[in-house]
Amino acid sequence: MFPEPRFVTANGLEMAVYEQGDGPPVLLLHGFPELAFSWRHQLPALADAGFHAIAPDLRGYGRTGGPSDIASYGIKELIADVEGLMDALDLPTATIVGHDWGALLTWHFAMTRPQRVERLVGLNIPHIPRPPIDPIELFRKRFGADFYIVNFQDSDAADRAFEADPRRLFTNLVRKNQVPRAVFEQLPDGAKVLSLLRVMERDDPGGEPILNDTELDFFVRAYEASGFTKPINWYRNWSRNWAAFDGVDQVIRIPTLFIAAADELVVGPEHVEAMGSLVPDLTVHTLDPCGHWSQQERPDDVNRLILKWLS
C-alpha cells in the first residue's frame, strides 16, 4: 500500500514526501508527467532491503505544488529543492535515483553538489554533454514545431489538452510494447517526431497499458487537482538551464549505475554510449524489452539491479 505523505519545508516549498523503511537513505526523483507514486514498486523493495526510501512529489507536481511563474522552475531552483529536502530530513548525503526529468535533475545535482551524493542511479535518460548552442534551437531545427519539447515552448496547447482529459493522456501514454526501437528506426523522419498531442489523438495507441485501473485513477485524480502547467514549466526553462551551466564541469566522479531501456525513444543508444567520457565510474545495464516507463514496466528487474548494485 502506498504510504501517506508527510509535508516537509524545503527551499520554501511544502513538499509532499512519501517514505518507507529505515537505514541508508535513497532519494527517488520522478519524471514527467509522473509523481512520487511512480516509485510505488521501489519504496517497499528498498525498505525491505534495509534502506530508507524517500520519494517526493517534486516542484509543481502532485501535492507539493509551487509558484505560478515559469522562471521558478529553472534548474537552480530544482537543485535547491533537493538540497533543501536533504537538509530538512537531516541527510548529509544520500544515494539519488532519477528517472526521465528526475534523471536530468540527478545529473545536474551531481555536477553542482557532489559532496551530497553517495551514489547515483539514472533510469532511461543519460547524462548528455552540454551542446554548443541552445538545445531548443537544435530541437527546432531537427524535429520541428511538433516535437513535444518545442511545442511546450511555443504555446499552452498541451497544457489545455492534457487538462481537458488526463485519463486519455495517461491511458495512451503510459504503455509498453508500443513501438520497438528496431521498428522506430525504420520509420520515415516525420514519423519519428515525438508529439504528445498526437498521442492524445490516437484512438488506438497500440501496445498494452502499464497502469491498472486503481493506478490510473491515482494519476488522474492528482492531475485533475494540480493541472499540467507547472510540470510543463520545467521544460520552458530548458534554454535558461543550458545558459546557467555554461562553464560548469560536466564530469561526474560519483559511482553511477545507469539502467537503459532498449525501446526508449526519447534518446538513442548512442547517447548511452557517450556517457563513458562524462561518468568514469559507470555501470550500465539495458532492459530489453523495455520502454520509457521502466520502473513501472519492469519493476522487479529495476529493483533487482538497484539493490544488487547498492549491496
Image (cartoon, grey):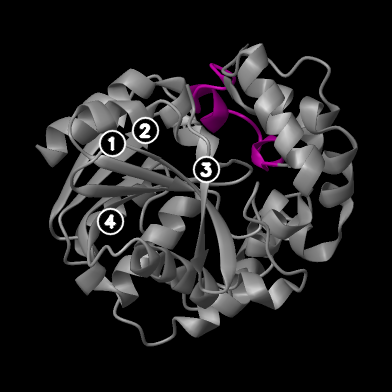
Q: Which amino acid does label 1 sit on?
A: Gly
Residue 173 lies in quadrant: top right
Whether the residues at callouts 1 and 2 have beta carbons within 8 Å, the answer is: yes
Q: Is residue 141 magenta?
A: no
Mark 1 or 4, nearer chain start = 1
For disc 2, the marked residue is 43
Viewer-nearest of discs 1 and 2: 1
Q: Which amino acid does label 2 sit on?
A: Leu
Q: Name the residue that disc number 1 marks.
A: 21
Q: What residue type is labelled 3?
A: Pro
Q: Which callout, 1 or 2, points at the residue further toward the start of the chain?
A: 1
Dot 3 or dot 4: first in sequence order is 3
- Calculate the distance from the C-alpha at mark 3 to the C-alpha at mark 2: 13 Å
**Residue at horizontal 86%, vertical 61%?**
155
Disc 1 to disc 4, C-alpha distance: 32 Å
Q: Looking at the image, can residue 50 be seen? A: yes
Q: What stretch is highlighted in magenta?
A: 176-194
Q: Are marks 3 and 2 in contact (CB under 8 Å)?
A: no
For the point 32% across and 41% down, the residue is 53
**Depth order, front residue of 193/213:** 213
Return the residue nearer the eye: 189 or 21: 21
Residue 33, position in %: x, y?
64, 43
Other-residue count near label 1 (Cα within 10 Å), few / some / many at <14 / 14–19 / ≥20: some
In the foreground, 162 or 55 = 55
* Disc with the residue nearer the chain's start (3 vs 2): 3
Residue type at numbered disc 4: Met
Up the image or down, 261 lies above or below 111; here it is above
Q: Alpha carbon of mark 3 to alpha carbon of mark 4: how far?
A: 35 Å
The image shows residue 198 at horizontal and vertical percentages of 80, 35
- 59 shown above or below 170: below
**Which circle, 3 or 4, is nearer the viewer?**
3
Q: Does the magenta stretch include residue 192?
A: yes
